[in-house]
Image (cartoon, helix red, strand yellow):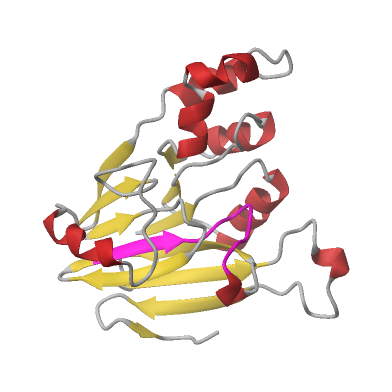
Amino acid sequence: MRFGIVSDIHCNVRALETAIDLMGPVDELVCVGDSIYEHRFSNEVVGLLRRSNVRMVLGNHEATFLSPLGCRARAVPTIDQNELAWLEERPHHITTKMGDKNVLIVHGAPWSPFGEYVYPKSRVLSRFSDVDADYVVMGHTHYQMVERVGNKVLINPGSAGEGRDQRNQRRLSFAVLDSDEGALHICNFQDPARVQDLGPGGEEPIWTAIDLEAGRVLQPV
């Protein structure tokens, strides 16, 4: 079974289209929140996710937009009300199965969906020992992460819309979780809006595969 995972798209529809194209066929498309950007809605991004039958959780940007603080933003006449209504129905977290694995999907942390930023090697990682899941899929930080805490694997695909991670030169990224292989495939790719500024070959995507049981890279960057 293959889960395609995107997060933190932030209204960047061209990047989302690129990510979906690069990941190829998947059994489930998962979005870990922040499809929109602060008080800016994107009919194109939300519509594409909806048509892709995505399983999506809300991020802090959706939470603000859908709260009383977002009343004026939601009244913009260009917003497709069908797309807005669909977004409003997304949950704060999803628990699901992937083969024999329990998967928890949440934007921030299980105990703070919109507030806690969980970075690689963070001190809060020990708190995941109490989480009832084999895989915990998160976003929020825009930083890629694959960390093992006991028998759990914590996964952050990075951002598919606004690169902030200096470790991959602020490229965009997504992940494909393959339960049959027991591997996570991470793809780093350039924002389509920036490709014209790159040199020859600079736009080529870079794939890395990580063995989730052994915790080792199968195909180094």
Reply yes or no: does residue 157 show up in magenta. Answer: yes
Camera sees residue 53: no
Main SS category, magenta section:
loop
**Residue at point 34%, 59% (across, down):** 1
Q: Which residue occupies the foreground of this view, 184 or 8?
A: 8
Q: Which residue occupies the foreground of this view, 203 or 144?
A: 144
- Percent of width and height locating residue 63: 45, 30
Number of disc labels: 0
Q: Which residue occupies the foreground of this view, 204 or 148?
A: 148
**Residue at point 58%, 23% (across, down):** 83
Quadrant of the frame with the C terminus: bottom right
- Above or below for 217 versus 125: below
- Above or below for 20 versus 182: above
Q: Which residues are magenta?
A: 153-165
- Above or below for 89 versus 81: below
Residue 152 sits in quarter: bottom left
Q: Is residue 200 left or right of residue 84?
A: right
Residue 94 sits in quarter: top left
Reply yes or no: does residue 47 show up in magenta. Answer: no
- Percent of width and height locating residue 110: 26, 46
Q: Is residue 198 left or right of residue 22?
A: right
- Percent of width and height locating residue 38: 60, 34
- Above or below for 86 versus 71: below
- Percent of width and height locating residue 196: 87, 65
**Residue at point 56%, 60% (across, down):** 24
Camera sees residue 160: yes
**Residue at point 36%, 62% (across, down):** 155
